[in-house]
Image (spheres, grey):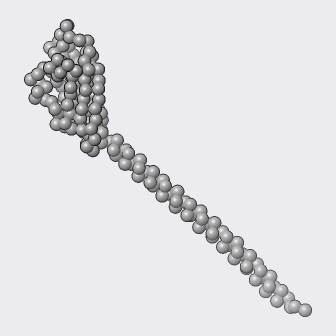
Amino acid sequence: MPSISLIVSVVSIVIACVALIRTRRYQQQQIKLLTEQVSIHKEVAALQAEAARAQKAKSVTADVRVALRGGGVRCRVSVRNEGPGAARDLNLNIAGGNDSLLLRGDYDVKLPIRELLPGDEVSLAAGVTHGDPPAYDAELVWTNEDGSHAKRTSRLTLQS
């Protein structure tokens, strides 16, 4: 008849084997979850890097606007950079030729604008009389800080 110590030893070995098997399964599940977590972190990091590149590219672009202000001898064409990036080699073209609205001596000296920093504004003398058209088509063309070219067309009407 087997002794009690032998039975206790066999039961202990069985319990230890069961515990070892469960611990191994648990570790394998942890390794699988950690691998998935690392993969997810890599994907998130790649998305964040892409978003940062897109934000950086977006942040260096200029947002140049043009407006016709005043009236009579005080009439001015205002060119303003409302974007976060600088506009370089900026040129303004008015349909029918720049001398149809802008005063020749002023635009000859000021255009093209070498650099228009964020928040900067350049004012050009303009001449509007009663016989002139009520609106002008304007086209702004410039180069952004990242070297990309930009263009905006606007309809100029007299604003006070």
Tag count in the figure?
Answer: 0
Residue 16, position as x, y percentages in the image: 73, 79
Q: Between residues 147 and 71, which one lies in front from this camera angle?
A: 147
> Which quadrant of the structure image shows residue 15?
bottom right
Q: Is residue 107 left or right of residue 68?
A: left
What residue lies at 21% left-to-right and 28% top-to-bottom? 92
- Residue 133 in the image: above or below residue 89: above
- Residue 13 in the image: above or below residue 107: below
Residue at the right extreme, as displayed = 1
What residue lies at 38% left-to-right and 45% top-to-bottom? 54
Residue at the left extreme, as displayed = 105
Q: Between residues 2 and 68, which one lies in front from this camera angle?
A: 68
Q: Is residue 132 left or right of residue 153?
A: left
The quadrant of the picture occupied by the C terminus is top left
Residue 147, position as x, y percentages in the image: 25, 43
Residue 134, position as x, y percentages in the image: 26, 12
Q: Residue 14, can we see it?
A: yes
Residue at the front extreme, as displayed = 96
Q: Is residue 13 left or right of residue 128?
A: right
What residue lies at 29% left-to-right and 20% top-to-bottom? 155
The quadrant of the picture occupied by the N terminus is bottom right
Q: Residue 119, can we see it?
A: no
What residue lies at 73% left-to-right and 79% top-to-bottom? 17
Residue 144, position as x, y percentages in the image: 26, 40
> Which quadrant of the structure image shows residue 29?
bottom right
> Which quadrant of the structure image shows residue 138?
top left
- Residue 76 in the image: above or below residue 140: above
